[in-house]
Image (cartoon, helix red, strand yellow):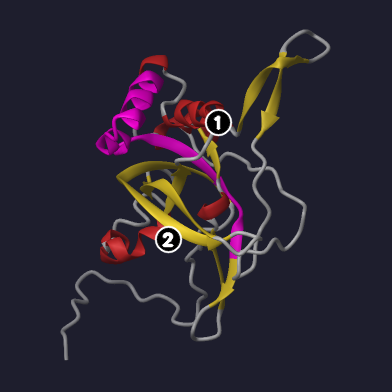
Amino acid sequence: MPKTDFTGVTASDPNAQSSYTEMGAGAYIVTSTAAYPDSFKFKRRDGVEQEVLQLRLVFDIAAGEFQGEYSDEWGKDPAHDFAHSVAIRYDTGAAKLLGIFEKLAGGEAHEVERLQEAWNTDDWAAFKGLTFGLAAGAQHYTNNAGYEHVRPYWRRAKWLTAGEVVAGGHYDHTKLDESGKPVFVPIELPADVDSKGQPLSAAAPAASSTYSDEDLPF
């Protein structure tokens, strides 16, 4: 049997409930840890099989309560990349691509230009080490032991800048309030989904920021 070091340990209530908090719906600051092209196939309505190419960005949580959530051996295993990654499809239009790059670059013009160049030259290494934001709904599922859990549903996450996560939203300069100032638009989370990725409800709650300046890794 392994030995336990009881030196300096104070007894705790063995019947107390665990204080562990699961990651669920929310807006998170993440940093990409790997970037590589992959693909998936699906059948169109006419029965023809089509392959979709995409760039996969694997990430870890960069700040806040769940910082380093995917830094353990499980998270580092490439077989589990699907559980903490987002993808940019190659057939995405130029305007939407530019919008994604702006989020990845934090709005920095020179960084946006760098990502555009990297995209067109297949320089996937340029997409590693980027710090940005993601807003995800929760996926509700039952594990093999029969217990109900939640986890962020990254597959339909919304792209954000890290600054938007900290602020809890952004100012829309195309809309002005009565005093002529830009309207603040809070982050709206995608709807929660079930184990098969189907929406549980149409309502999407607003995300409140849980970050402070001290949380930020940059």
Whole-percent x and y of residue 197? Answer: 61, 64
Q: Which residue is mark 2?
A: 83
Q: Which mark is residue 96?
A: 1
- Placement of 14 over or under 201, stated as above or below: below
Whole-percent x and y of residue 203? Answer: 77, 52
Q: What is the secondary structure assignment of the residue under circle 1?
A: helix
Q: Return the residue found at the far bottom.
A: 1
Res 177 quadrant in image: top right
- Placement of 114 over or under 156, stated as above or below: above
- Sort mark 1 into few (<14), some (14-19) or many (20+) by Cα contacts within 10 Å: few
The quadrant in which the C terminus is found is top left
Q: How many marks do you count on the picture?
A: 2
Q: Nearer the viewer, mark 2 or mark 1?
A: 1
Mark 1: which amino acid? Lys
- Sort mark 2 into few (<14), some (14-19) or many (20+) by Cα contacts within 10 Å: some
Q: Is residue 34 visible?
A: yes
Q: Nearer the viewer, residue 129 or 155?
A: 155
Q: What is the secondary structure assignment of the residue under circle 2?
A: helix
Whole-percent x and y of residue 114? Answer: 33, 22
Residue at (22, 77) in percent of width and height: 6
Residue at (49, 26) in percent of width and height: 98
* 47 displayed left or right of 166: right
Res 1 quadrant in image: bottom left
Q: Is residue 218 visible?
A: no
Residue at (65, 46) in percent of width and height: 189
User: Residue 42 lies in magenta, yes or no?
Assistant: no
Disc 2 to disc 1, how far (Cα)? 24 Å
- Placement of 184 over or under 24, stated as above or below: above
Mark 2: which amino acid? Ala
Stretch in magenta: 111-139
Whole-percent x and y of residue 137? Answer: 61, 53
